Amino acid sequence: MKLHVTAALIGCLLLCAVPAQALTIGDPFPDFTVPNTLSPEHSAYLKVPHKGKIQLSEISCDVIILEFLNVYCHTCRIQVSIFNELKQAIAADSDLRDRVCLLGLAVGNSLEEITTFNEEFAVTYPILSDQDKTLFTSTGNIRGTPHTYVIRRDDMGFIVDYHAGGVSSAERYLDSLRHTLRSSLTGTQPGNRVPPFAFQAGGRDITAASLANERFILYFASSQARTIENDLRTMSRQNEVLKNSALKNAIKVFIFPPEGSDCAAHAVPEPLVCAIDKGNTVRELFDVGDQPTVLCINEFGRIVYRAESLSQLAAERIFEGTEYTPRPQLSPTEIQELIRQRIAAAGHQVAEIEHLTLENRQDLYVITASPQGSGLFFFARVESGITMCDVCHDTHFGYVFDQNGVVTDFIPLEITKYGNVEWDEADIAKMKKNLIGRSLFVPFVFNPSVDAVTAATMSSSMIYEAMNRAREYFGDFSEYRFREDYWKKECFSVICKIKNLARKAAAQQPDFMLDEGSLQKIMSGSSLQGCPTGGMYIVLDGDILCSQHGLNLQGCDH
């Protein structure tokens, strides 16, 4: 039997005394000073003097990506290649290279252990020691390594992004960086500087430069049919709202007809101007697909709004000078208390509610049921949707689901029907009946004649659209024992594929032996990624053990 028991099998959990509240997005990250044990190259990378001490607040990068790791943590080891890739991508990006740096803090590890780790895994970013766990303890997080914080230095050291656990690609943090620095970066999302563009309208050439210091709207219409009356995503209804906005706010509005049609095919009312987009170059520039898109740009050249439609109410708020984001009136604390009450009403006491931002930047509330060590968790998501009807307010609601992804509750926050009348108890009861008991991973098909709340077809359809997005949001989520059986089954499926390839190799090579070396060759040669939740595969008496899911006692179907 060949079995290597490593510190990775012990796990990454490092228990220590912690503050009552763990640091998260919006909190200032505590300043610290540690001995500088880095090479001259890594000291220069952080823009700090070689030798002496390093103080976090003296690192002059605009943004610091700070990772707490442990050199024996399996997930931390896997993440090295991703952080190496991230460092390389930042260096290749002219907008980011002089503004962003990476720094690792090895929790509980000595300088010698860090040196061995750097050599074994070819680490390209600097790692300092937090051997006595003082810095890790100061964050208040005890769920183990890795923990990664994105800190905006010129914003008083506030945490602008946070992620517990590993990530699947460097793109997750590149997205976060572009979002953090978006006001000074060119892009096509709210907050970005509008990229250079050119099209014709009203018999003249229009460019981003020619619209400098002006407010304007770009509307890309869609030919998709809409079955719901008064849906602002239809071109005729949206043109009506844009016309009113242009007249009231002295805003220039450019209408891009649906793909495959031109200005002659559509009656665009004045003062709106129909745009000629040769070769769909502007559509492609702004990444406009087959859905309608409205972009509002302020006088500073920043995109302040992007959505499928624009209501009159939203337009009024946008041109007051603020970026428009739909938010419920309840505060995050009030929402958490409401979730606590709903979980308690269902018969479960709440030990803790944690507000997470997932790798895909989606928000999620994790509810730990009492007693804390029971392993029972619930999850809640709050959805805020921009109205698709010009006589309605935005829609805000929450839903709760269990560890299998089954909806257990629907929580209306602010939902109205025609005339901006709040939903009554019968309306809420109908939507609960529609949603509760259904899996997030099965499509929610909306039938207006059956599923819609009376006089609330639009908001009802928005709820179904949000529920359908959950499959994408939580399809890769595996923490807190979420979809535990599903991920275990996926892991054992990979193991069975490996064992099948090993049998084929043994049939062709009489001296073949399944050990850790041949295991790695099989996985790399077949592009198998291993356990989907980060478990480590180990050969045990000719079988394969997953450090997270154990042995596949049910066997494989051959």
Image (cartoon, rainbow, N blue to C red):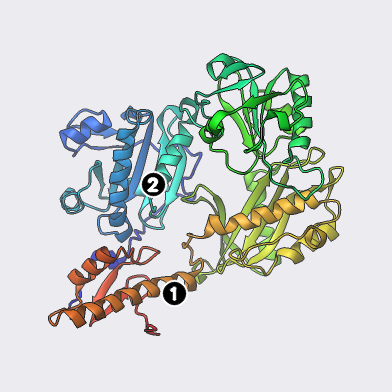
Q: Secondary structure at mark 2?
A: strand
Q: Residue 310: horizontal and vertical position, in percent?
A: 71, 34
Q: Which residue is mark 2?
A: 148
Q: Nearer the viewer, residue 132 or 233?
A: 233
Mark 2 Cα within 10 Å, few/some/many (few <14, many 20+)?
many
Point out the residue furthest to the front here. Answer: 264
Q: Residue 222: horizontal and vertical position, in percent?
A: 67, 40
Q: Nearer the viewer, residue 28 or 247?
A: 247
Mark 1 Cα within 10 Å, few/some/many (few <14, many 20+)?
few
Q: Residue at x 63, y 43 (%)?
A: 291
Q: Residue at x 33, y 48 (%)?
A: 68
Q: Amino acid at mark 1?
A: Lys
Position of the C terminus by quadrant: bottom left
Q: Is residue 200 left or right of residue 4?
A: right
Q: Amino acid at mark 2?
A: Thr
Position of the N terminus by quadrant: bottom left
Tell me where residue 325 sits by quadrant: top right
Q: Nearer the viewer, residue 342 or 503?
A: 503
| Dot placed on the residue nearer the N-terminal end, 2 or 1 | 2
Q: Nearer the viewer, residue 440 or 242?
A: 242
Q: Which residue is mark 1?
A: 489
Counting every numbered tag in the picture gives 2
Q: Is residue 420 left or right of residue 142?
A: right
Query: Visible in this render: residue 29?
Result: no
Query: Visible in this render: residue 351?
Result: yes
Measure how far apart labels 2 and 1 are at the Cα level: 29 Å
Q: Residue at x 86, y 51 (%)?
A: 455
Q: Secondary structure at mark 1?
A: helix
Q: Residue 125: horizontal and vertical position, in percent?
A: 25, 41
Q: Residue 178: horizontal and vertical position, in percent?
A: 45, 35
